[in-house]
Each structure stands twice: as C-alpha cells, then as structure tokens.
Amino acid sequence: MGTPAELERRRRRAVVLMSQGESPTVLARILGVGRPSLYRWQKAARSHADGLAAKSHPGPTPRLSDAQLAQLEGLLLQGASAHGWANELWTAARVADVIRRHFGVSFHPEHVRKILKRRLH
C-alpha cells in the first residue's frame, strides 16, 4: 500500500519501465500487482495527465459524529450506575445500550469495542 503520493510514484515508475522495455511479468511480480493493472496504468498515463493519481477512499461516514462521541464520553464518565446498572462496570453491551438509548443508533457490542478503541481514546 502506501500514501497516495507513493502509489502514484510507483505507477508512474512502472509505466516508464514498461516503455523502456521492461517485462510486464517481472514488473508485476516485483510490485505485487497483476499484469492487467500495469496495462491499465499504461493506458491511463496515455489518456490524461492525472490518470495515475491515487484517489483517496475515505470510507463510510461514521454513524456517530465527533460531537456525539464527545457526548458519549461524558455519559460514560457519569458511571454505569447513573444509567441504571447496579455496579460501575462498563461492558461493550452496556455501552451499546447507552448509544442506542441516547443517539438512536444500534451497534453490535464488538463494534462498540472498536469505536471505544479507535475513536474514543
């Protein structure tokens, strides 16, 4: 993989090497790509200047905004008993329940673990 700039540089270098007679089979093996990708890059380089530029893929829009995550953090800091549980133990299932009740968004507890680890740290 790499950054978009690294991907573009790799594609441009592959096109140059192919135009200099380097074997597409060898290049594909070295770069870890299929030969059809090399030919696609070559065609894109001929058709327009930015044809080899790597496009960013931001992924899906998060179902909880940054503002909602900040609110969630505040809710969790109140403690589990403030939300109706008998003890202060936060489990992924309990956090999922708080998210559902306060934001109307349902998550599987395993996904809640990922949210807590990646976005609420």
Image (cartoon, rainbow, N blue to C red):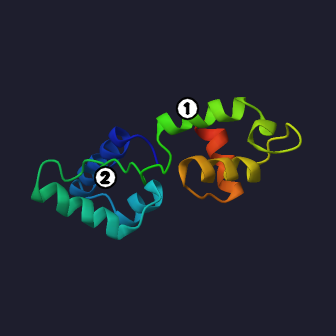
Q: Residue at x 48, y 51 (%)?
A: 63
* Amino acid type at image mark 1: Ala
Q: Residue furthest bottom?
A: 36
Asked whether residue 121 appears in the rendered view, the answer is no
Q: Residue at x 70, y 47 (%)?
A: 95
Residue at the disc numbered 1: 70
In this rendered view, identify the residue nearer to me: 121 or 16: 121
**Residue 78 location in percent, x, y?**
72, 30
Q: Secondary structure at mark 2?
A: helix
Residue at the disc numbered 2: 14
- The residues tagged by marks 2 and 1 sit, at their Cα atoms, a distance apart of 46 Å
Instruction: Give the total number of marks visible in the rendering.
Output: 2
Mark 2 residue crowding within 10 angstroms, few (<14) / some (14–19) / many (20+): many
Q: Is residue 61 left or right of residue 81?
A: left
Asked whether residue 71 appears in the rendered view, the answer is yes
Q: Residue at x 12, y 58 (%)?
A: 46
* Amino acid type at image mark 2: Ala
First-in-chain label (2 vs 1): 2
Q: Residue at x 48, y 34 (%)?
A: 67
Quarter of the picture containing the C terminus is top right
**Residue 9 location in percent, x, y?**
31, 42
Q: Is residue 88 left or right of residue 22?
A: right
In this rendered view, identify the residue nearer to me: 90 or 54: 90
**Residue 2 vertical placement versus 75 (above, below):** below
Identify the image quadrant of residue 60: bottom left
Q: What numbered label is drawn on residue 46?
A: none
In this rendered view, identify the residue nearer to me: 18 or 78: 78
**Residue 34 location in percent, x, y?**
41, 67
Mark 1 residue crowding within 10 angstroms, few (<14) / some (14–19) / many (20+): some
Q: Residue furthest right?
A: 87
